[in-house]
Amino acid sequence: MTSKDIKKRIVCIGGGTGTFVALKGLKQFGQHLQAIVSMSDSGGSNKRIRDEFGLLPTSDLRQCLVALSDENGGVGLLRKLFMYRFEKGEGIKGMTFGNLFMAALTDIVGSQQEAIKQTGKVLRIHGAVIPVSYTDTNLEATYEDGTIVKEEHLIDEPEHDGTLKITNLELRPKAIGNPDAIKAIKTADLIVLGPGDLFTSVLPNILVEGIAEALKNTNATIVYVMNLMTKFGQTYNFTASDHIKTFEKYIGKSIDYVLVNSAPIPKKALEVYQKGKEYQVKDDLKDQAYYHVSRKSLINTSMVKVSKSDTLVRSLIRHDSDKLGEAIMELL
Protein backbone atom coordinates (compact mmCIF):
# COMPACT_ATOMS: atom_id res chain seq x y z
CA MET A 1 0.00 0.00 0.00
CA THR A 2 1.42 3.39 -1.00
CA SER A 3 1.01 6.63 0.93
CA LYS A 4 -1.56 7.73 -1.67
CA ASP A 5 -3.72 4.72 -0.79
CA ILE A 6 -3.95 5.65 2.89
CA LYS A 7 -7.15 7.54 3.68
CA LYS A 8 -6.61 10.97 5.19
CA ARG A 9 -8.62 11.99 8.24
CA ILE A 10 -10.64 15.12 7.41
CA VAL A 11 -12.73 16.80 10.11
CA CYS A 12 -15.36 19.43 9.24
CA ILE A 13 -16.43 21.69 12.10
CA GLY A 14 -19.62 23.75 11.92
CA GLY A 15 -23.28 23.09 11.40
CA GLY A 16 -26.13 23.74 9.05
CA THR A 17 -26.02 24.17 5.30
CA GLY A 18 -22.35 25.19 5.10
CA THR A 19 -21.07 21.97 6.61
CA PHE A 20 -23.56 19.99 4.49
CA VAL A 21 -22.04 21.54 1.34
CA ALA A 22 -18.44 20.84 2.45
CA LEU A 23 -19.16 17.21 3.38
CA LYS A 24 -21.06 16.53 0.17
CA GLY A 25 -18.15 17.84 -1.87
CA LEU A 26 -15.52 15.89 0.07
CA LYS A 27 -17.43 12.60 0.13
CA GLN A 28 -16.57 11.78 -3.49
CA PHE A 29 -12.83 11.59 -2.70
CA GLY A 30 -13.12 8.53 -0.46
CA GLN A 31 -11.29 9.96 2.54
CA HIS A 32 -12.03 9.34 6.24
CA LEU A 33 -14.64 12.04 6.97
CA GLN A 34 -15.91 13.21 10.35
CA ALA A 35 -18.30 16.09 11.05
CA ILE A 36 -18.25 17.85 14.41
CA VAL A 37 -21.61 19.57 14.81
CA SER A 38 -22.73 22.46 17.01
CA MET A 39 -25.48 21.64 19.51
CA SER A 40 -26.82 25.02 20.63
CA ASP A 41 -29.36 25.75 17.87
CA SER A 42 -32.69 26.92 19.30
CA GLY A 43 -34.69 28.11 16.30
CA GLY A 44 -37.38 26.68 14.04
CA SER A 45 -38.08 22.96 14.48
CA ASN A 46 -35.07 22.67 16.80
CA LYS A 47 -36.88 24.77 19.39
CA ARG A 48 -39.78 22.31 19.29
CA ILE A 49 -37.40 19.34 19.47
CA ARG A 50 -35.83 20.85 22.58
CA ASP A 51 -39.00 22.14 24.26
CA GLU A 52 -41.46 19.36 23.42
CA PHE A 53 -39.20 16.29 23.26
CA GLY A 54 -36.50 17.34 25.73
CA LEU A 55 -33.77 16.49 23.19
CA LEU A 56 -30.71 18.29 21.92
CA PRO A 57 -31.18 20.00 18.52
CA THR A 58 -31.15 17.59 15.57
CA SER A 59 -31.34 19.71 12.40
CA ASP A 60 -27.59 20.19 11.92
CA LEU A 61 -26.96 16.52 12.75
CA ARG A 62 -29.59 15.51 10.20
CA GLN A 63 -28.06 17.63 7.45
CA CYS A 64 -24.60 16.18 8.05
CA LEU A 65 -25.95 12.62 8.11
CA VAL A 66 -27.69 13.22 4.79
CA ALA A 67 -24.57 14.82 3.30
CA LEU A 68 -22.53 11.71 4.15
CA SER A 69 -25.23 9.21 3.18
CA ASP A 70 -24.92 6.66 0.40
CA GLU A 71 -26.37 8.08 -2.83
CA ASN A 72 -26.82 4.73 -4.55
CA GLY A 73 -29.85 2.43 -4.58
CA GLY A 74 -32.78 2.81 -2.23
CA VAL A 75 -30.97 5.12 0.18
CA GLY A 76 -31.52 7.93 -2.31
CA LEU A 77 -35.21 7.95 -1.43
CA LEU A 78 -34.37 7.99 2.29
CA ARG A 79 -32.13 11.01 1.73
CA LYS A 80 -35.10 12.88 0.23
CA LEU A 81 -37.34 11.77 3.10
CA PHE A 82 -34.88 13.03 5.73
CA MET A 83 -34.79 16.47 4.11
CA TYR A 84 -38.56 16.62 3.52
CA ARG A 85 -40.28 19.47 5.37
CA PHE A 86 -44.01 19.18 6.07
CA GLU A 87 -45.96 22.06 4.55
CA LYS A 88 -49.34 20.99 5.95
CA GLY A 89 -50.70 19.57 9.17
CA GLU A 90 -51.40 21.34 12.41
CA GLY A 91 -48.57 20.57 14.81
CA ILE A 92 -46.10 19.25 12.25
CA LYS A 93 -46.04 22.03 9.65
CA GLY A 94 -42.46 23.25 9.30
CA MET A 95 -40.99 20.09 10.84
CA THR A 96 -38.72 17.80 8.84
CA PHE A 97 -39.24 14.05 8.55
CA GLY A 98 -35.63 13.49 9.58
CA ASN A 99 -36.00 15.38 12.86
CA LEU A 100 -39.17 13.45 13.74
CA PHE A 101 -37.50 10.15 12.77
CA MET A 102 -34.56 10.82 15.08
CA ALA A 103 -36.86 11.86 17.94
CA ALA A 104 -38.84 8.62 17.57
CA LEU A 105 -35.67 6.54 17.30
CA THR A 106 -34.35 8.07 20.52
CA ASP A 107 -37.42 6.72 22.32
CA ILE A 108 -36.92 3.30 20.75
CA VAL A 109 -33.18 2.86 21.43
CA GLY A 110 -33.11 4.73 24.73
CA SER A 111 -30.64 7.55 24.06
CA GLN A 112 -30.03 10.31 21.56
CA GLN A 113 -26.39 9.27 21.26
CA GLU A 114 -27.38 5.78 20.12
CA ALA A 115 -30.11 7.18 17.85
CA ILE A 116 -27.49 9.22 15.97
CA LYS A 117 -25.37 6.11 15.42
CA GLN A 118 -28.34 4.05 14.26
CA THR A 119 -29.51 6.82 11.90
CA GLY A 120 -26.04 6.72 10.36
CA LYS A 121 -26.47 3.00 9.72
CA VAL A 122 -29.90 3.49 8.17
CA LEU A 123 -28.48 6.09 5.77
CA ARG A 124 -25.27 4.09 5.22
CA ILE A 125 -23.11 7.16 5.81
CA HIS A 126 -19.53 7.37 4.61
CA GLY A 127 -17.90 8.77 7.74
CA ALA A 128 -19.08 9.84 11.19
CA VAL A 129 -21.25 12.63 12.61
CA ILE A 130 -20.16 13.73 16.09
CA PRO A 131 -22.08 16.13 18.36
CA VAL A 132 -19.56 18.58 19.78
CA SER A 133 -21.19 18.17 23.21
CA TYR A 134 -24.10 16.47 24.93
CA THR A 135 -24.60 19.39 27.32
CA ASP A 136 -27.98 21.13 27.06
CA THR A 137 -26.73 24.67 26.54
CA ASN A 138 -27.61 27.98 24.89
CA LEU A 139 -25.61 30.74 23.21
CA GLU A 140 -25.34 34.12 24.89
CA ALA A 141 -24.07 37.13 22.94
CA THR A 142 -23.09 40.51 24.36
CA TYR A 143 -23.13 43.48 21.96
CA GLU A 144 -21.08 46.67 21.97
CA ASP A 145 -23.91 48.68 23.56
CA GLY A 146 -24.26 46.18 26.41
CA THR A 147 -27.29 44.37 24.97
CA ILE A 148 -27.32 40.68 25.91
CA VAL A 149 -29.16 38.11 23.76
CA LYS A 150 -29.55 34.65 25.26
CA GLU A 151 -30.65 32.24 22.52
CA GLU A 152 -29.12 31.26 19.19
CA HIS A 153 -32.19 31.97 17.06
CA LEU A 154 -32.44 35.52 18.47
CA ILE A 155 -28.79 36.11 17.52
CA ASP A 156 -29.42 34.62 14.09
CA GLU A 157 -32.57 36.65 13.45
CA PRO A 158 -32.12 39.76 15.61
CA GLU A 159 -34.94 41.68 17.21
CA HIS A 160 -32.33 44.21 18.40
CA ASP A 161 -30.12 46.53 16.30
CA GLY A 162 -28.41 44.09 13.93
CA THR A 163 -25.67 46.57 13.00
CA LEU A 164 -24.12 46.23 16.47
CA LYS A 165 -20.95 44.18 16.85
CA ILE A 166 -20.78 41.15 19.13
CA THR A 167 -18.09 41.74 21.78
CA ASN A 168 -18.48 38.48 23.69
CA LEU A 169 -19.96 35.06 22.97
CA GLU A 170 -20.35 32.22 25.45
CA LEU A 171 -22.34 29.11 26.22
CA ARG A 172 -24.54 28.95 29.29
CA PRO A 173 -24.23 26.63 31.02
CA LYS A 174 -20.69 25.79 29.98
CA ALA A 175 -20.65 22.81 27.64
CA ILE A 176 -18.38 19.83 28.19
CA GLY A 177 -16.60 18.64 25.06
CA ASN A 178 -17.55 15.27 23.63
CA PRO A 179 -14.39 13.09 23.98
CA ASP A 180 -15.05 11.73 20.47
CA ALA A 181 -14.94 15.27 19.05
CA ILE A 182 -11.69 16.12 20.86
CA LYS A 183 -10.11 12.86 19.68
CA ALA A 184 -11.17 13.56 16.09
CA ILE A 185 -9.44 16.95 16.17
CA LYS A 186 -6.27 15.58 17.73
CA THR A 187 -5.94 12.76 15.19
CA ALA A 188 -7.00 14.70 12.07
CA ASP A 189 -4.83 15.36 9.04
CA LEU A 190 -6.94 18.31 7.91
CA ILE A 191 -9.62 20.35 9.69
CA VAL A 192 -12.18 22.48 7.84
CA LEU A 193 -13.85 25.38 9.68
CA GLY A 194 -16.99 26.61 7.93
CA PRO A 195 -18.50 27.76 5.77
CA GLY A 196 -21.41 28.88 7.92
CA ASP A 197 -22.63 31.69 10.14
CA LEU A 198 -19.60 32.72 12.17
CA PHE A 199 -21.25 33.33 15.54
CA THR A 200 -24.05 30.74 15.42
CA SER A 201 -22.66 27.79 13.44
CA VAL A 202 -18.86 27.71 13.70
CA LEU A 203 -17.83 29.48 16.92
CA PRO A 204 -20.36 27.63 19.16
CA ASN A 205 -18.23 24.53 18.59
CA ILE A 206 -15.05 26.33 19.64
CA LEU A 207 -16.69 27.62 22.84
CA VAL A 208 -17.19 24.05 24.09
CA GLU A 209 -14.63 23.08 26.74
CA GLY A 210 -11.62 21.30 25.24
CA ILE A 211 -12.27 22.19 21.59
CA ALA A 212 -10.25 25.42 21.31
CA GLU A 213 -7.33 23.80 23.15
CA ALA A 214 -7.46 20.80 20.81
CA LEU A 215 -7.42 23.10 17.76
CA LYS A 216 -4.40 24.99 19.11
CA ASN A 217 -2.46 21.78 19.71
CA THR A 218 -3.43 19.60 16.76
CA ASN A 219 -0.88 18.73 14.07
CA ALA A 220 -3.60 18.91 11.42
CA THR A 221 -3.68 21.55 8.70
CA ILE A 222 -6.54 23.95 9.52
CA VAL A 223 -8.52 25.53 6.69
CA TYR A 224 -11.13 28.26 7.07
CA VAL A 225 -13.67 28.59 4.26
CA MET A 226 -14.56 32.29 4.08
CA ASN A 227 -18.27 33.07 3.97
CA LEU A 228 -19.68 34.60 0.79
CA MET A 229 -21.92 37.15 2.50
CA THR A 230 -22.03 39.11 5.75
CA LYS A 231 -24.78 38.28 8.24
CA PHE A 232 -27.04 40.97 9.70
CA GLY A 233 -26.96 40.69 13.50
CA GLN A 234 -23.63 38.87 13.49
CA THR A 235 -21.06 40.09 10.99
CA TYR A 236 -22.59 43.32 9.68
CA ASN A 237 -19.98 45.08 7.48
CA PHE A 238 -17.33 42.45 8.35
CA THR A 239 -14.46 42.14 5.90
CA ALA A 240 -12.58 38.87 5.40
CA SER A 241 -9.86 40.03 7.82
CA ASP A 242 -12.52 40.76 10.47
CA HIS A 243 -13.54 37.10 10.29
CA ILE A 244 -9.94 35.98 10.82
CA LYS A 245 -9.43 38.39 13.74
CA THR A 246 -12.50 36.87 15.41
CA PHE A 247 -11.00 33.39 15.12
CA GLU A 248 -7.72 34.67 16.57
CA LYS A 249 -9.61 35.73 19.68
CA TYR A 250 -10.75 32.16 20.32
CA ILE A 251 -8.07 29.85 18.83
CA GLY A 252 -5.07 32.14 18.39
CA LYS A 253 -3.10 32.00 15.16
CA SER A 254 -4.01 28.41 14.33
CA ILE A 255 -5.45 28.76 10.81
CA ASP A 256 -3.10 27.60 8.03
CA TYR A 257 -5.16 28.36 4.91
CA VAL A 258 -8.10 30.62 4.08
CA LEU A 259 -10.21 29.63 1.08
CA VAL A 260 -11.86 32.63 -0.60
CA ASN A 261 -14.33 32.67 -3.47
CA SER A 262 -13.01 34.70 -6.40
CA ALA A 263 -16.00 34.36 -8.73
CA PRO A 264 -18.61 37.15 -9.03
CA ILE A 265 -21.90 36.74 -7.18
CA PRO A 266 -25.01 37.20 -9.37
CA LYS A 267 -26.37 40.75 -9.26
CA LYS A 268 -29.91 39.52 -8.55
CA ALA A 269 -28.75 37.69 -5.43
CA LEU A 270 -26.79 40.71 -4.20
CA GLU A 271 -29.90 42.88 -4.57
CA VAL A 272 -31.97 40.45 -2.50
CA TYR A 273 -29.34 40.28 0.24
CA GLN A 274 -28.95 44.07 0.28
CA LYS A 275 -32.60 44.42 1.26
CA GLY A 276 -31.72 42.49 4.42
CA LYS A 277 -28.60 44.64 5.04
CA GLU A 278 -26.26 41.81 4.04
CA TYR A 279 -23.41 42.26 1.60
CA GLN A 280 -20.63 40.36 -0.12
CA VAL A 281 -17.66 39.84 2.21
CA LYS A 282 -14.86 42.19 1.08
CA ASP A 283 -11.67 40.28 0.37
CA ASP A 284 -8.95 42.36 2.08
CA LEU A 285 -6.68 39.42 2.93
CA LYS A 286 -2.97 39.07 2.28
CA ASP A 287 -0.74 36.10 3.02
CA GLN A 288 0.42 36.28 6.62
CA ALA A 289 3.29 34.68 8.49
CA TYR A 290 0.95 31.97 9.74
CA TYR A 291 -1.65 31.53 6.99
CA HIS A 292 -1.93 31.52 3.21
CA VAL A 293 -4.87 32.72 1.11
CA SER A 294 -6.20 30.51 -1.68
CA ARG A 295 -8.61 32.17 -4.12
CA LYS A 296 -10.80 30.04 -6.38
CA SER A 297 -14.20 30.02 -8.03
CA LEU A 298 -16.26 28.35 -5.30
CA ILE A 299 -19.77 29.66 -5.82
CA ASN A 300 -22.93 27.90 -6.96
CA THR A 301 -24.65 30.55 -9.08
CA SER A 302 -28.12 28.98 -8.77
CA MET A 303 -30.28 30.71 -6.16
CA VAL A 304 -31.70 28.32 -3.57
CA LYS A 305 -35.47 27.81 -3.35
CA VAL A 306 -36.73 27.64 0.22
CA SER A 307 -39.74 25.64 1.44
CA LYS A 308 -42.78 27.83 2.14
CA SER A 309 -43.22 26.19 5.55
CA ASP A 310 -39.64 26.93 6.64
CA THR A 311 -39.87 29.65 9.28
CA LEU A 312 -36.14 30.44 9.31
CA VAL A 313 -34.21 32.78 7.01
CA ARG A 314 -31.93 30.72 4.74
CA SER A 315 -28.97 31.63 2.54
CA LEU A 316 -29.87 32.09 -1.12
CA ILE A 317 -26.38 31.73 -2.57
CA ARG A 318 -24.07 28.95 -1.41
CA HIS A 319 -20.71 27.40 -2.12
CA ASP A 320 -20.64 24.75 -4.84
CA SER A 321 -20.05 21.32 -3.27
CA ASP A 322 -17.84 19.94 -6.03
CA LYS A 323 -15.71 23.08 -6.37
CA LEU A 324 -15.28 23.40 -2.61
CA GLY A 325 -14.39 19.71 -2.22
CA GLU A 326 -11.73 19.94 -4.93
CA ALA A 327 -10.25 23.12 -3.45
CA ILE A 328 -9.96 21.55 0.01
CA MET A 329 -8.41 18.37 -1.37
CA GLU A 330 -5.75 20.41 -3.19
CA LEU A 331 -4.63 21.77 0.18
CA LEU A 332 -4.40 18.21 1.51
Image (spheres, rainbow, N blue to C red):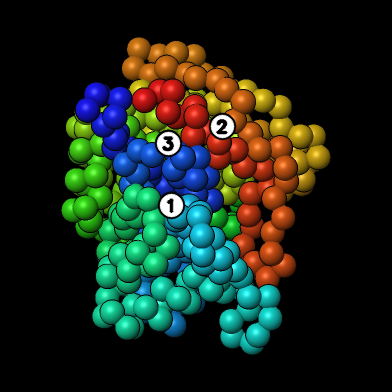
Observer able to see residue 239? no
125 to 324, vertically: above or below:
below
Instruction: Name the amino acid type tagged 2.
Output: Lys
In the picture of the structure, the residue carrying the numbered disc 3 is 29
Q: Nearer the viewer, residue 84 or 316?
A: 84
Q: Position of residue 296 (x, y in %)?
A: 57, 22
Q: Secondary structure at mark 3?
A: loop
Instruction: Name the amino acid type tagged 3.
Output: Phe
The numbered dot on residue 323 is 2
Q: Nearer the viewer, residue 18 or 255?
A: 18
Q: Secondary structure at mark 1?
A: helix
In the picture of the structure, the residue carrying the numbered disc 1 is 68
Is 41 left, or right, of 54 in this rendering? Answer: right
Instruction: Name the amino acid type tagged 1.
Output: Leu
Residue at 44% of width from left, 56% of height from top?
69
The numbered dot on residue 258 is none
